[in-house]
Image (tube, rainbow, N blue to C red):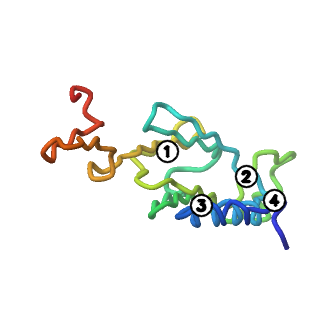
Amino acid sequence: MRTPFDLTPYRRSTVGFDRVFDLIENNARLQQTDNYPPFNIERVSDDRYRVTLAVAGFKADEIDITAQQNLLQVTGRKEETSAEDRAKFLHLGIANRNFERRFELADFVRVENASLADGLLIVELVREVPDAMKPRKIAINGKGEVIDLGDKNAA
């Protein structure tokens, strides 16, 4: 099965972006048809993000958050209810089914905090680029002088 778009021309003219193209193609191929639980992703500041999932009916001990390199996985497991307990409901409109949500994280993004309140699971993310990866300005014929561009007072 082919993806709805062809990235081959871009792969030919770029170097080192294989992982990005693989993520795009895998995401297009594995588009989730299940939209449960609904979620928001917001940018709080330049290096801070917030993922909010609507997990009504779940307790903190029924939700598992796993952060690996470049992957955030949120899993919810409800105890099985008996047929007798389900028979008590006249209308069952709140979905209390098990779920698993995966979010691809960029390099150097880590989970800072997670909280559960009012049926919303909030996961705070922060991007921390190591000093060695930050841009530096190299002086020409400047006796090896290097200026850190991350430092606002330099220049």
Q: In which quarter of the image is residue 78?
A: bottom right
In this picture, residue 65 sits left or right of residue 13: left
Labels 1 & 4 near each other (Cβ < 8 A) = no
Front: mark 4 or 2: 4
Tell me the SS state at disc 1: strand
In the picture of the structure, the residue carrying the numbered disc 1 is 123
Tell me the SS state at disc 4: loop
Q: Earlier in the sequence, mark 4 or mark 2?
A: 4
Q: Which of marks 2 and 1 is nearer the N terminus?
A: 2
In the picture of the structure, the residue carrying the numbered disc 2 is 36
Labels 2 & 3 near each other (Cβ < 8 A) = no
Residue type, mark 1 in image: Val
In the picture of the structure, the residue carrying the numbered disc 4 is 5
Q: Distance between the residues labelled 2 and 3?
A: 36 Å
In the picture of the structure, the residue carrying the numbered disc 3 is 14
Front: mark 1 or 4: 4
Residue positioned 86% across, 45% down in the render: 91
Front: mark 2 or 3: 3
Crowd class of label 1 (few under 14; some 14 to 19; many from 20; radius 10 Å)? many
Tell me the SS state at disc 2: loop
Residue positioned 49% across, 31% down in the render: 44
Q: Where is residue 149 in the image (x, y as percent from the top left)?
A: 29, 36
Q: Is residue 53 above or below residue 151?
A: below
